[in-house]
Image (cartoon, rainbow, N blue to C red):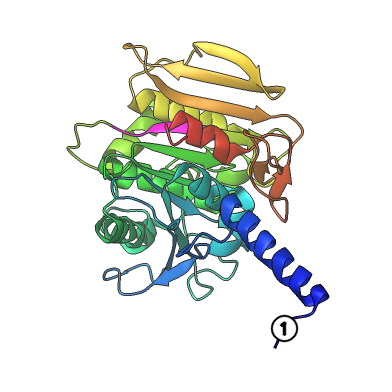
């Protein structure tokens, strides 16, 4: 049967459309679907009873970095991974993300228990569970064990400091957003005093708390990048000051910033050790409340999406961390 002229035109148009799509790479044969967040079970003894999620971009080669991203209270792995921008950057730069998730049976507000002695010691509780997730991820995706980083918001930031102190050999650096120094609840006598007032400790006392978490460890200790809103009334800005005191002391740097400038209009400082290496970096986000700084958009320095405790302040913390860590 001979096709009509109209049908013939439709056929030619369809072929042309297909050809354009193929040229554009939109319909490349064998093209994989977008990666998605996956839960991993059986990753270890899991003494902290946490859940493990991960994001691995399609086609990720072996030998790539890993970022461990710890959500804040009332959040979950998926929401934090997307909102913070870490999943977006994983696709852009090529690394995998491990996203631990708290369970309400452990904490009614889904906060990581950064203040509980049994969850912040090496080999115990939630700290040990997160360490087991790292080991599982390294094995499963053949990642680079020398390029593993840990970050988190609020209670997740407190747990980031825990991982840096209790498992320093696993992490090159930590990124703490609206978080707290290691051992702060114990030093202050209460997690709430720590959050709202801070703990009275000298830099050496702060450093001694970190060293006690990993007795006999000769280093190197992780470096620190910290972000804090000046209008945060949940975790007061004094906590970033104390984080700076703690980790400059651990890393052998003094308390005087070697760089004081501004990034995206916000005060930024860098503290270097005697060898000139940047060991602590801080961003004081003027006027920001309690949350993760993001800068939604498609620009090269933009990432994240605003939501509860994820705040659009024209600065994406994940991007700044990732650049400092050599991820992109």
Q: Nearer the viewer, residue 117 or 269?
A: 269
Q: Nearer the viewer, residue 43 or 26?
A: 26
Asked whether residue 246 appears in the rendered view, the answer is: yes
Name the quadrant of the N terminus: bottom right
Mark 1 residue crowding within 10 angstroms, few (<14) / some (14–19) / many (20+): few
Left or right of 152? Residue 9 is right
Q: Position of residue 220 (x, y in %)?
A: 26, 31
Give me the residue at 49% from left, 31% from top: 323
Give me the residue at 56% from left, 66% from top: 110
Asked whether residue 200 appears in the rendered view, the answer is: no
Give me the residue at 43% from left, 71% from top: 39
Assign the magenta stretch its main secondary structure.
strand
Q: Position of residue 157 (x, y in %)?
A: 51, 47
Q: Number of labelled discs?
A: 1
Q: Position of residue 186 (x, y in %)?
A: 44, 47
Q: Nearer the viewer, residue 97 or 69?
A: 97
Whether residue 222 is in magenta: the answer is yes
Residue interval drawn in magenta: 221-226
Whether residue 91 is in magenta: the answer is no
Q: Residue furthest right?
A: 6
Q: Quadrant of residue 7?
A: bottom right
Identify residue for label 1: 2
Q: Quadrant of residue 315?
A: top right
Q: Residue furthest bottom?
A: 1
Label 1's element?
loop
Q: In this rendering, is residue 22 above or below 104? A: above
Left or right of 4? Residue 11 is left
Left or right of 229? Residue 47 is left
């Amino acid at each position: 049967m001979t096709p009509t002229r109209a049908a013939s035109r439709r056929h030619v148009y369809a072929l042309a459309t297909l050809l354009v799509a193929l040229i554009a790479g939109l319909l490349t044969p064998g093209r994989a679907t977008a990666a998605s967040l996956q839960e991993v079970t059986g990753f270890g003894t899991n003494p902290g009873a946490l859940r493990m999620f991960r994001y691995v971009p399609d086609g990720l080669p072996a030998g790539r970095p890993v970022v461990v991203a710890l959500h804040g209270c009332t959040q979950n792995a998926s929401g934090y991974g997307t909102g913070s921008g870490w999943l977006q950057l994983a696709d852009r730069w090529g690394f995998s993300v491990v996203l631990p998730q708290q369970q309400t049976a452990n904490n009614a507000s889904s906060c990581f228990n950064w203040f509980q002695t049994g969850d912040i010691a090496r080999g115990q509780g939630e700290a040990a569970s997160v360490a087991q997730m790292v080991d599982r991820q390294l094995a499963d995706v053949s990642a680079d064990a020398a390029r593993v980083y840990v970050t988190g918001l609020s209670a997740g930031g407190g747990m980031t400091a825990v991982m840096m102190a209790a498992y320093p050999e696993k992490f090159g650096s930590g990124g703490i957003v609206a978080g707290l120094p290691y051992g702060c609840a114990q030093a202050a006598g209460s997690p709430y005093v720590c959050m709202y007032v801070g703990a009275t400790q000298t830099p050496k006392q702060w450093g001694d708390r970190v060293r006690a978490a990993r007795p006999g460890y000769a280093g190197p200790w992780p470096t620190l990048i910290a972000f804090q809103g000046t209008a945060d009334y949940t975790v007061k800005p004094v906590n970033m000051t104390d984080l700076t005191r703690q980790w400059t002391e651990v890393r052998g740097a003094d308390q005087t910033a070697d760089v004081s400038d501004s990034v995206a209009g916000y005060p930024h400082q860098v503290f270097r050790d005697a060898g000139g290496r940047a060991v602590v970096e801080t961003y004081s986000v003027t006027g920001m409340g309690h949350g993760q700084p993001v800068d939604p958009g498609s620009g090269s320095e933009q990432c994240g999406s605003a939501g509860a405790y994820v705040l659009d302040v024209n600065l994406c913390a994940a991007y700044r961390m990732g650049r400092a860590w050599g991820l992109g």
